[in-house]
Image: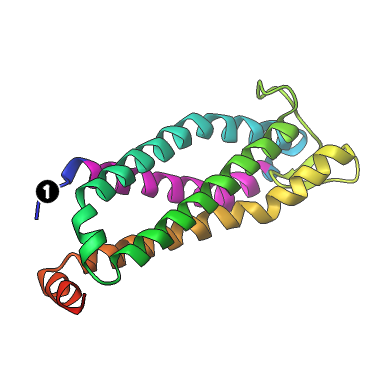
């Protein structure tokens, strides 16, 4: 079996950052922004705006690594029982995570206002509007309040499926999977 160290590293590091960063922001940044008093909205916006380029690089690295892994394992995908199904599931989860991430960013731009990080919407936390929050921003924050947990759930599921994929590469599993076909 050929080594795919670079593509595996890109896949894993990108996915780790995507998962960990969005989870940390949901667990820590959004609630911590609520401690900023009148600048709650601004603090949350600045934090998410700083994370966005890092997250984009992480997602890009993950996608490049995923394609590299798929190319490197195309023989196993075609010949080993269960690998094609696992690859399809990873692709579906990745597409869902990408879609939710993109939609969340578009909602974040609504909350952010100008896109410069200078906006300071009335907010109790990064995703909790107040009664004074403009209706459009409040609606976006309410959606983000739920979606902030969906991205780590989807990327966490990708980590689990990727662990399973690694187990499928054990010599004993390859032999069993190929012989069943």
Q: Which residues are magenta?
A: 7-33
Tell me the quarter of the image containing the C terminus: bottom left
Instruction: Tell me what residue is drawn at x 77 percent, y 34 percent.
Output: 38
Is residue 133 at all visible to an observer of this figure?
Answer: no
Q: Which residue is mark 1?
A: 3
Q: Quadrant for residue 107, please give it.
A: top right
Q: In the displayed structure, does residue 77 sit left or right of residue 93?
A: left
Q: Total of numbered circles in the picture?
A: 1
Q: Nearer the viewer, residue 64 or 42?
A: 64
Q: Quadrant for residue 157, please give it.
A: bottom left
Tell me the quarter of the image containing the N terminus: bottom left
Rendered position, 84 above or below 48: below
Rendered position, 85 above or below 105: below
Is residue 149 at all visible to an observer of this figure?
Answer: yes
Q: Position of residue 130 (x, y in %)?
A: 85, 45
Q: Position of residue 112 (x, y in %)?
A: 71, 30
Q: Position of residue 90 (x, y in %)?
A: 40, 58
Local crowd size for mark 1, using a 10 Å CA cut-off: few (<14), some (14–19), many (≥20): few
Q: Nearer the viewer, residue 13 or 178?
A: 178
Instruction: Tell me what residue is drawn at x 10 percent, y 69 percent.
Output: 171
């Amino acid at each position: 079996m050929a080594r795919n160290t670079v593509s595996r590293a890109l896949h894993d590091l990108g996915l780790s950052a995507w998962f960990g960063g969005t989870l940390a922001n949901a667990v820590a940044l959004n609630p911590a922004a609520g401690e900023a008093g009148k600048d709650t909205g601004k603090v949350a916006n600045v934090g998410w705006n700083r994370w966005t380029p890092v997250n984009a690089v992480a997602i890009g690295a993950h996608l490049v690594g995923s394609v590299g892994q798929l190319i490197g394992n195309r023989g196993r995908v075609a010949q080993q029982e269960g690998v094609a199904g696992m690859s399809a599931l990873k692709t579906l989860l990745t597409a869902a995570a990408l879609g939710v991430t993109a939609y969340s960013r578009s909602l974040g731009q609504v909350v952010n206002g100008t896109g410069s990080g200078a906006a300071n919407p009335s907010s109790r936390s990064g995703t909790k509007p107040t009664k004074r929050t403009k209706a459009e921003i409040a609606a976006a924050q309410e959606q983000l309040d739920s979606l902030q947990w969906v991205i780590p759930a989807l990327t966490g599921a990708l980590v689990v499926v990727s662990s399973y994929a690694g187990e499928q590469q054990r010599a004993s599993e390859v032999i069993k999977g190929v012989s069943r076909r």
